[in-house]
Image (cartoon, grey):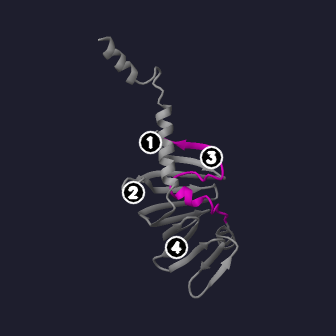
Amino acid sequence: VLFLMGCAWFNSAPLGGDSSLVKYDTIASHTAQVAALKHWGFTGKLAVKKGGEGLSVRMSWYQNDSDYSVSFRNFLLGEVFSIEKSNSLFVVDEGQGARYEVESGSEFLRERFGFVFPESSIPFWLKGIPAPIDHISEGGPGIDGRYRDFSQSGWWVTITEYDERSKPPLPRKIKIANGQLELSIVVNEWRFY
């Protein structure tokens, strides 16, 4: 009987129910799996709100390590614009033959639309994790290792739904806001290359 009691005690959780080790492993595992995705993409919808104005477009995002290609289309207007980043070269295509190089994708967005966007952080945020280049000031992961909301670089990222079909689970509904601008993204389909 003492032997059986010893085995039960040995396999039980520590007194006080310390689940922080399990939680840390879950968070580290999910974050590592998501961060390891280097070749991915998605199609979906983007709603942009700035002041009292708004715009809704379909978007496609393709990420190849640190390079990306993103395009935005509107039902009435067709392709609104696309940005491609390859190495340190940014090419913007505004359709109708207007194709040119810019210093950065965020610089183009600032000049064209009046807002600055942290382009090096967005690929991480879209996958539902903070960018490793800056600490998060608020929020954090849940017990399942998934982030629901966090604040980083002056932006608040909120994930209201995950796509359980993707492995690892990735955000399906994301809101990114900074007080002046709000981006709402609904992912239709994740793709891995």
- Answer whether residue 120 is magenta in the image: yes
Mark 4 surroundings: few (<14), some (14-19) or many (≥20) residues within 10 A = many
Q: Which residue is mark 2?
A: 166
Q: Which residue is mark 3?
A: 136
As drawn, the label of residue 72 is 4
Q: What is the chief secondary structure element of the magenta stretch?
A: loop
Q: Earlier in the sequence, mark 4 or mark 2?
A: 4
Mark 1 surroundings: few (<14), some (14-19) or many (≥20) residues within 10 A = some
The CA distance from mark 3 to mark 1 is 18 Å
Q: Which residue is mark 1?
A: 144
Q: Earlier in the sequence, mark 4 or mark 3?
A: 4
Range of magenta residues: 115-142
What is the secondary structure assignment of the residue under circle 1?
loop
Mark 3 surroundings: few (<14), some (14-19) or many (≥20) residues within 10 A = some
In this image, 163 relative to 24: left or right? left
In this image, 3 relative to 77: left or right? left
The CA distance from mark 1 to mark 2 is 15 Å
The CA distance from mark 2 to mark 3 is 25 Å
Circle 1: residue type:
Asp
What is the secondary structure assignment of the residue under circle 3?
loop
The CA distance from mark 1 to mark 4 is 33 Å
Q: Is residue 149 above or below residue 41?
A: above
Q: Earlier in the sequence, mark 1 or mark 2?
A: 1
The CA distance from mark 4 to mark 3 is 29 Å
Disc 2 vs disc 3: which is toward the camera?
A: 2
